[in-house]
Amino acid sequence: MRILTFALVFALVCLSKALPLESDINFHPYFKEAISSFNVKILKKLIETEKGNNIFYSPFSLHLALTQLLMAAPEGSDTAKELSALLGVDASRRLDLKDDYAKIINDLERITKSQNVVVNLANRFYIANSFTVKQTYSDVMQQIFKTSTEQVDFSNGKEALLKINNFAKNATNGLIESVFEKELSSSTVFVLLNTIFFKGSWQYKFDPADTKTMSFNVDSNTQVPFQAMTAERPDTIRYSQELKSLIMEFPYKNEDLAMLVVLPTRDADLQMVENNLEHLNLTEFIGLRFDSKRHGNTDVVLPKFEAKFAIKDLPALLQQLGVKSAFDEVSLVSFTNFINTCKFYQYCNIFISLNKK
């Protein structure tokens, strides 16, 4: 029996959706690679700007939101080209993107019907009441992305703020109480909200009686105490030569979903792992629990924690990654497939809880 301790370096946590066992979903070949490439770009930039801080975000959520903005940008425009480059897709393949997201969102709805997991994806466009959304765009957003549209009087700052924050709070079961702390400008044209709420039960639960206090090695000189969940579970571990790390799959009761944890080995440091993330293809490690060749059990130690994280200046991050035209205050024609003229800004907020259940 091998002993695996995730208290040493908690490098990367991913909620990873395996392909459904009971359906034949075929994505366009580029789609998984596009999201993986997008994830690496965002994560590496966050590592630069959030030195010393824990980072939690959903690449799927952010990719989905930006894809909806891509649909609003005229084909051939600078904004369409810049968003496409960041999202990892060719600007001419919008129809493919819509097909793939339609499949994912419909499948998430199927998964949500399970008694063992809740996956709530909610999108909302709030648009100034002096503008009207083009019907063709509204149809795509509603039919493909399940995004509803609501007109708002942004000149009534308190009412608009309350309406937006209440939507986020309700969609996340109260975990994210507010998206904006201050009233938005009365000149705001639209706000795009994307929320994902996930709650799942482990296939192999951690026994509360086995929770103990242990030391977490922040670096070679710093240790902090943490609550450690311990359990013996079937061996679902593989080794990544590119990252010099162990990768373990933690399945939920619903077999379509699992969490992957990447743990650097003792001969690798976290910075080396971060520098080589582009070589990591997480899809190779999905489904370890179904590998009939794997036998035995592993003793696992995993931190129990709650954490909040916010990308407070997402526009700056996107501009550093090449999306600049959308923020040009001189040319407000970035999204004319959506409405006549507009510009946008975004804020990203996330809450995560990892516990014994």
Image: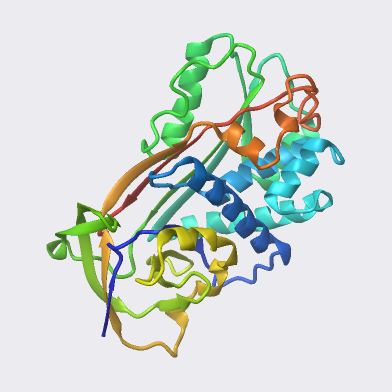
Residue 87: x, y in percent?
68, 49
Q: Using the image, determine if residue 76 lies above or below residue 340.
A: below
Q: Using the image, determine if residue 6 lies above or below residue 74.
A: below
Q: Using the image, determine if residue 336 lies above or below residue 291.
A: above
Q: How many marks?
A: 0
Q: Nearer the viewer, residue 247 or 47?
A: 47
User: What residue is rendered at 56% in x and 34% in y?
Assistant: 314
Q: Nearer the viewer, residue 16 or 228?
A: 228
Q: Quadrant location of residue 175?
A: top left
Q: Quadrant location of residue 4?
A: bottom left
Q: Using the image, determine if residue 293 lies above or below residue 136.
A: below
Query: From where the camera sits, is residue 4 visible?
Result: yes
Q: Quadrant location of residue 330?
A: top right
Q: Residue furthest top?
A: 155
Q: Residue furthest right?
A: 76
Q: Nearer the viewer, residue 185 or 50?
A: 50
Q: What colour scheme was applied to this rendering of the protein? A: rainbow
Residue 93: x, y in percent?
81, 53
Q: Quadrant of the C terminus?
A: bottom left
User: What residue is rendered at 81% in x and 48% in y?
Assistant: 91
Q: Quadrant of the N terminus?
A: bottom left
Q: Residue furthest front?
A: 221
Q: Nearer the viewer, residue 59 or 240?
A: 240
User: What residue is rendered at 49% in x and 67% in y?
Assistant: 256
Residue 326: x, y in percent?
72, 31
Query: From where the camera sits, is residue 124 visible?
Result: no
- Asked whether, in this view, residue 278 is left or right of residue 114, the answer is right
- Asked whether, in this view, residue 113 is left or right of residue 329, the answer is left
User: What residue is rendered at 84% in x and 50% in y?
Assistant: 92
